[in-house]
Amino acid sequence: MASTNGKIEIAKEHANGSTLDMDHITAQLKKVGLSQPPTFSGVQLSPEYNPVDIYRAYIIEQIHEITGAEPAIINNAVAWTQDLKHGDLALPVPALRLKGKKPDQLAIEIAEKFDCPIVEKPIADKTFVRFFFKPGPLASLTLDYVLKQKAQYGFNPLLGLQDSSKPDGKRKRMIVEYSSPNIAKEFHTGHLRSTIIGGFMVKLYSAAGWETISMNYLGDWGKQYGMLSQGFEKYGSEAELERDPIKHLNEVYVKINQDNAAEQKEAIELAKRKEGLEKIKNPPKPMKAKKGKENEVVPEVKWGEEQDKELEEVTGQLEKVQEELVAKPSIDEKARQFFKRMSDGDPEALKYWQKFRDLSIEAYKHMYARLNIAFDDYSGESTVQVENMDKAAEVLHERGVSEDSKGAVIVDLAKHGAPTLGKTLVKKRDGTSLYLTRDIAANHERYEKYGFDHMIYVVASQQDLHLAQFFKILQLMGSPYSEVVAKCEHMSFGMVKDPNGQTMSTRKGTVVSLADSLDAAKEFMHGVMRENDEKYQQVENPEATADVLAISAIMVQDYSGKIINGYNFDMKRMTSFIGDTGPYLQYSHARVCSMARKANVPRSALESADFTLITAKEGVELVRALAQWPDVFLNTYKTREPVTVLTYLFRMTHMLSSCYDAKDAGNRNAKTMSVMYAESEEKKAALMGLYEAARQVLGNGMRLLGLEPLERM
């Protein structure tokens, strides 16, 4: 499979002949008495990419003839099944929306009248009709697809076309913004989710034929870099910076934040006291009771001269402490002043920032390479043009979206029909912009540069409010901003927490370093590999192989639940070879590779094998699972959940494993699916063709997830 920038490039390869043309498919069908699959107006089937669509075409044709239902309605109703015991395809008869006959009676009629040489007699199951494909034709068709299409099997480039009726037409363009760490911060396990989820989205849309742009929008601007510069002056070492820039800058950042927290302690405590007193004086209005419930009883608030005096004293003390911190100046005030100098283009202020940025990007690139991720565009808050921010601020003001508030500029979204989104700051009193201002300008700049059809922001659920405010403001700004944001979406995901379930924080120094985690997992995997010295000696690069195993372990744990759900980073569970883990998938792939090396069956023999010789139950079930892969991909394209792929791969590899142990109890427990003990060269080629097809599908699914399939381990 061609791969650039961590993408799956398939459109050109399909166009260059790795797809199956309809003449070849028709020739296969003629062997069982069929001709070219029928086509229907308003029904988009892709038999050149999906063998099950051949079956769909004949099923649609016959159900239409039997019931008179519209082909498009039948197509939408016929569904693939999660469990093959319920059929290869199933039809819920009520979904045909036909009047005059009870669904269970119509199910019986369809089952009785249906007749197709590649499908068994259907089973009427209450209001369902279940279709089971005949094993021989299915094996011949499916394995032919897999062995000829190879790395492209299962993927459908027609999905990314502007016009699906024009295969050579223009493709839709997608930007995926993801990872986006703050420079000079250590890449920790919390950053992992955005990175691999975003990488998966790029691969998914690339495999569906979209033109994809992989974007890393770095957090490389703001007061925190004034804080970091002070920290480096106080705690920094040029030698440590060169040796391990991210780790050293992270240590410096944690130390200076600890100093700042100590310095701000009195002001923070006074601010909390003031806020508490103000809430007592002006308590929030009680929530309106739900229907049938009593109104909330609000306790009586005692507020008199004594409380007024206390609030006045606390306010005075807070103002005095804040003035002293500014006059000192405090670490926080120095950071603010330093960022103001950066914003004004002061070369001395920008010197350290540029060095930190360059070193950070180089360090991140190394980590991304380990994760099989690369970016087309490294942009950042610092690259947003000032004139575009000024233009956005002007539009906000002219259209009455923003307002002045004590010298700052805010947007009160409650005044614009979104009370739950509250108020948000657009520009500080000192005139410096916030990242919301930059996000607004950056959104427009991207459209000007790329003219995208869709853009996904892959950002953690912690930022849900910010993204909602950002999108709402763009809508309020009107054309052209509102048209662009209509093409955008926020893909939210749950947080990665430490092994104890606690949220990680760079400032508090509680993050789990991803590099350290990968290295620890790598060492563990290396130790497991050494336990089998014979196999270990055959691995060309044991260190690199151990690293791939470690990354597979970590990524598979991340993919094991829905994207919106968070999880605790559990190294012990993820590195296990027992159960549904990354190492298990790698083992399954490497085992078939080992079998292929020992069997040494020529590729030409695999492609010309008679797959009707595969008659054992375990082999038939595996073929059925392999036929489902294109539908699994299509379903994943709709759900955009990596776990959809992962669940399928584990189910398929369990079927593959059961083939190795298949025995014929009626023939002295003969190994019915063994390549090495096959009763003939023809059977050997057919079985090895099946296993090679399973390896190919497993590899295709793993690469879609961003995993590098291993051939030895």
Image (cartoon, grey):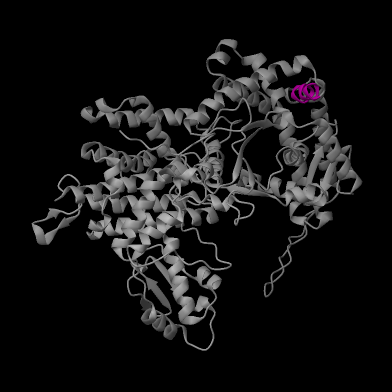
- Quarter occupied by the C terminus: top left
Query: Residue at the location (29% across, 43% down)?
Result: 604
**657 left or right, relative to 2:** left
Q: Residue furthest top?
A: 239
**Which part of the image, by quadrant, shows the N terminus?**
top left
Relative horizontal placement of residue 566, taking residue 664 as reference (left or right): right
In this image, 109 relative to 493: left or right?
left
Residue 341 falls within the magenta-colored stretch: yes
Q: Which residue appears farthest toward the bottom when viewing the image?
A: 100
Residue drawn at the location 63% of the way across and 21% of the way down: 358
In the rendered view, tell whether residue 233 sits above or below residue 381. Answer: above
Q: Which residues are magenta?
A: 334-343
**Res. 403 in view:** no
Toward which corner of the image does residue 276 lie, by quadrant?
A: top right
**Nearer to us in this view, 350 or 676:** 676
Expressed as whole percent of the image width and height from the top left, the position of residue 254 reads: 60, 25
The spot of residue 589 in percent (x, y) is: 33, 41
Image quadrant of residue 104? Answer: bottom left
Q: Main secondary structure of the magenta part?
A: helix
Does the magenta segment cover residue 63? no
Residue 434 as seen in the image, left or right of residue 672: right
**Residue 485 visible from this viewpoint:** yes
Q: Residue furthest left?
A: 668
Q: Tell me residue 489's x, y (percent).
A: 66, 50
Q: Position of residue 35 (x, y in %)?
A: 41, 65
Q: How many marks?
A: 0
